[in-house]
Amino acid sequence: MRIKNKQDFWSGVMFFAIGTGFALGATSYSMGTAARMGPGYFPFWLGVCLALLGSVVAITAMLPKAEHVKLEKFDWGIAVILLGSVALSGLLLNYLGVYISVFLLVFLSSYASHVFNWKVAAANGLFLVVFVWLAFIKGLGLIFPLWPTFLGN
């Protein structure tokens, strides 16, 4: 079989590899049951689902009815911006707090877009800060530093 849609094929292979890795890694944790899930239950089944999704995407890219698409050149600049913004956010979380580090993460990673707009990036950043506050701080009760440590909170 010939690969007609190389972009979908390699995306499917990537999903399959990551899903298989997570599923295999989760087997080192206690699985539990569906009624009493252990720490390995959710990552195992999430990995299995991701691997199945990757298989379907890769196989459909080889079907005769698949659209013929060539693989574009990998843009290392975008990868550096995205990975750098995530790493910077993780490094600054304890010093700047959740609110500022999440906003910086969204705003800086928006530079990876070819159609960057600072107003849209700021609005997305504010929305995600509110979402993180509602979901993780209020909803789940997780304890994170909310504001910078040098402010004395």
Image: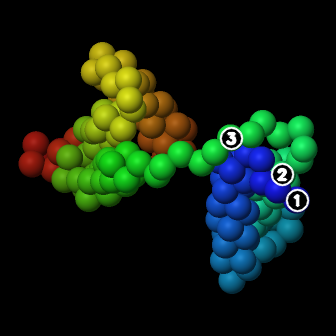
Tell me, yes or no, whether the two marked residues, 2 and 3, touch with CB atoms within 8 Å. no
Image spot of residue 17 (x, y percent): 68, 67
Mark number, residue 62: 2
At mark 2, the secondary structure is: loop
- Of badges 2 and 1, the one in the foreground is 1
Mark 3, residue position:
69
Count neighbours of disc 3 (C-alpha within 10 A) and say few if under 14, some if 14 to 19, many if 20 or more. Answer: few
Where 18 sits versus 115, above or below? below
At mark 3, the secondary structure is: loop
Image spot of residue 88 (x, y percent): 27, 53
Image spot of residue 64 (x, y percent): 90, 44
Tell me, yes or no, whether the two marked residues, 2 and 1, touch with CB atoms within 8 Å. yes
Residue 45 left/right relative to 81: right
- Residue 69 appears in which quarter of the rendering? top right
Quarter in which the C terminus is drawn: top left
Query: Which mark is first along the chain, 3 or 2?
Result: 2
Count neighbours of disc 1 (C-alpha within 10 A) and say few if under 14, some if 14 to 19, many if 20 or more. Answer: few
Give the colour scheme of this rendering: rainbow
Q: At 33% across and 48% down in the image, what residue appears?
A: 77
Mark 1: amino acid: Met
Mark 1, residue position:
1
Count neighbours of disc 2 (C-alpha within 10 A) and say few if under 14, some if 14 to 19, many if 20 or more. Answer: some
Residue 131 left/right relative to 67: left
Tell me, yes or no, whether the two marked residues, 1 and 3, touch with CB atoms within 8 Å. no
Q: CA separation, marks 2 and 1? A: 6 Å
Image spot of residue 72 (x, y percent): 53, 45
Query: Which mark is first along the chain, 1 or 2?
Result: 1
Is 103 in front, or is 17? 17
